[in-house]
Image (cartoon, grey):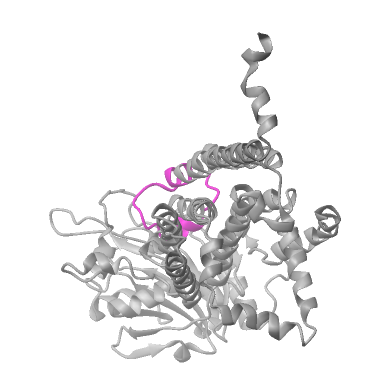
């Protein structure tokens, strides 16, 4: 913990400075992973490669995606990679509020950006055709189609409008149970499981909320249902965030025990972490509401366009009066 | 179409919850001692001891090992913790010869070999001072998920080091078994170590 409780603030803690090499390369050192994960690297490289290939093919076929969608997609991937595989990960392991920020990015911001960019079309295009048809050709003659059934069932379960939000909030609560949190922060495998589960569930949940209905296929969730889910996840996050930031005792002593990375007191650390769970976590629901309303408006407009006679009636109320 | 499939999907909920519960948590044995079996990584390191000899975990196989990170210029917590461990060893009597306390310095710049040797010598023959190069030490703190950093030096160049305060306790096979937090009771540690040496279960009589 500490051998003298004097807290001094300097932007880069001293030891970090001495561990990093000098010169202009110094800042690059902070971008290197603290604990290298081949899985994270492989997943990110593969995803980005598929996406880039999809972008190039779509452009060649005369259906370019534009600038903003890829920008938002890459921002989401880069943020998620950054909080896992840079020096940020070290800080997240040894400061509660940085940990909360990390989980906020893995569970909320990263997946929201990725889903908002509508990446499915591009990624699908990016998968080599031989691979797409090859899988089907391999499964059918071997009568292995049944393998897909449990997968579909699992997908529908995870996308169920009751299960998805409960899982989303349940994971936040679960990893913040003090005993579970203690075990997670001292065990590398549990720590990795936490990060992966939060990111994967972030993608699943925000896909339920933010994806257009026509893209969701058989597991589509209605827009009105989504508008009911959002206040629920907002309220439950407010409850846990407020609890963490307002209780007058230490809930997560593991950070003080294993050495604080930032020179702030454990209580302040906990309060900032609670506020991060409370406010930005709950605010993300507002973003969700705006996106869902936009989907609803677009769907309505499309309906009106397809049946112009019905569209004409409400738009001319003055004629009726006259 | 999607309604019946949803109904079929609901039974998966207990499965998902069960999977979550399986990830489990650490068991609290006494107020300040936690059972960390299977949580903390097994004992493994490459460091140099106070006599200048390169040592690894294999050199301490068969002994109960207490691992602590600190530095000799520390004014309160490190000497207090080491004194508590010395007292716990005292209570073990002759069994103490099968216990090693590894004091890993997080301040190798000031804790030279001779400084370290004098320092651990004050606590008893079971105390071993270990230091390593920057990369050896970094590997060690990554493995045990602890951190340390130097404070700002004062006018005369003295600085404090902010570091972890826990004692990791490993059994004779190098498996992590206990995590003692500052404020642990010497008697409790002595009892637990006696059980570890007997190869017994830690949960007995608790």
Viewer-nearest residue: B193 or A179: A179
Examine the structure image and report whether residue A265 is included in the region drawn in magenta: yes
Q: Residue at x 37, y 56 (%)?
A: A2
Toward the top, the furthest residue is A322
Name the image quarter holding residue A131.
bottom right
Left or right: where B18 falls relative to A280: right
The N terminus of chain B, quarter of image: bottom right
Picture coordinates of residue A292 (x, y %)? Answer: 60, 41
Examine the structure image and report whether residue A161 is included in the region drawn in magenta: no
Picture coordinates of residue A223 (x, y %)? Answer: 67, 41
Viewer-nearest residue: A108 or A309: A309
Q: Which residues are magenta?
A: A249-271
Q: Residue at x 58, y 67 (%)?
A: A193
Q: Is residue B31 visible?
A: no
Toward the left, the furthest residue is B155
Left or right: where A235 falls relative to A145: left
Please count the marks in the image. Answer: 0
Q: Residue at x 49, y 55 (%)?
A: A110
Q: Is residue A17 visible?
A: yes
Picture coordinates of residue A255 (x, y %)? Answer: 46, 57
Viewer-nearest residue: B15 or A224: A224
Q: Is residue B69 above or below residue B172?
A: above
Viewer-nearest residue: B87 or B43: B43
Q: Is residue A145 above or below residue A239?
A: below
Picture coordinates of residue B191 (x, y %)? Answer: 62, 71
The C terminus of chain B, quarter of image: bottom right
Q: Residue at x 56, y 39 (%)?
A: A294
Left or right: where A12 falls relative to A111: left
Name the image quarter holding residue B20.
bottom right
């Amino acid at each position: 913990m500490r051998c003298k409780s004097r807290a001094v603030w300097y932007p880069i803690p001293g030891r970090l400075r001495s561990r990093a090499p000098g010169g202009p390369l110094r800042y690059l050192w902070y971008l290197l992973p603290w604990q290298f994960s081949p899985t994270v690297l492989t997943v990110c490289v593969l995803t980005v490669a598929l996406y880039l290939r999809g972008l190039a093919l779509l452009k060649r076929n005369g259906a370019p995606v534009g600038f903003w969608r890829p920008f938002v997609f890459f921002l989401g991937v880069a943020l998620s990679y950054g909080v896992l595989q840079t020096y940020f990960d070290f800080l997240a392991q040894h400061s509660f509020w940085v940990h909360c920020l990390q989980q906020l990015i893995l569970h909320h911001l990263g997946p929201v950006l990725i889903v908002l960019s509508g990446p499915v079309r591009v990624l699908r295009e990016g998968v080599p055709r031989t691979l797409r048809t090859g899988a089907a050709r391999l499964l059918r003659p071997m009568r292995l189609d049944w393998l897909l059934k449990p997968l579909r069932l699992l997908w529908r379960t995870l996308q169920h409008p009751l299960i998805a939000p409960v899982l989303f909030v349940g994971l936040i609560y679960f990893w913040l149970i003090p005993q579970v949190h203690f075990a997670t922060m001292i065990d590398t495998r549990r720590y990795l499981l936490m990060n992966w589960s939060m990111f994967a569930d972030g993608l699943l949940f925000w896909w339920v909320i933010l994806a257009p209905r026509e893209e969701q296929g058989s597991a589509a969730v209605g827009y009105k249902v989504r508008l009911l889910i959002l206040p629920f996840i907002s309220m439950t996050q407010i409850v846990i965030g407020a609890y963490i930031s307002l209780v007058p005792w230490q809930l997560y002593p593991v950070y003080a025990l294993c050495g604080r990375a930032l020179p702030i007191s454990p209580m302040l650390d906990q309060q900032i972490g609670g506020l991060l769970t409370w406010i930005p976590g709950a605010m993300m629901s507002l973003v969700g509401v705006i996106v869902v309303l936009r989907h609803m408006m677009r769907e309505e407009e499309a309906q009106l366009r397809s049946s112009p006679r019905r569209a004409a009636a409400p738009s001319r109320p003055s004629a009726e009066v006259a | 179409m999607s309604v019946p499939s949803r109904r079929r999907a609901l039974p998966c909920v207990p499965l998902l919850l069960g999977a979550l519960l399986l990830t489990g948590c650490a068991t609290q044995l006494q107020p300040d001692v936690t059972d960390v079996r299977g949580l903390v990584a097994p004992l493994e390191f490459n460091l140099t001891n106070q006599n200048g000899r390169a040592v690894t975990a294999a050199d301490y196989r068969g002994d109960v090992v207490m691992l602590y990170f600190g530095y000799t210029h520390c004014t309160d917590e490190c000497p207090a913790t080491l004194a508590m461990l010395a007292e716990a060893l005292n209570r073990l009597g002759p069994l103490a010869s099968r216990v090693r306390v590894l004091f890993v310095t997080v301040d190798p710049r000031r804790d030279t070999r001779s400084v370290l040797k004098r320092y651990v010598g004050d606590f008893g023959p079971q105390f071993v001072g270990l230091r390593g190069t920057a990369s050896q030490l970094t590997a060690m703190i990554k493995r045990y998920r602890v951190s340390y950093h130097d404070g700002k030096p004062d006018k005369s160049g003295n600085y404090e080091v902010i570091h972890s305060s826990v004692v990791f306790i490993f059994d004779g096979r190098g498996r992590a078994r206990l995590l003692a937090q500052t404020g642990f009771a010497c008697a409790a540690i002595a009892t637990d170590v006696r059980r570890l040496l007997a190869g017994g279960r830690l949960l007995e009589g608790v």
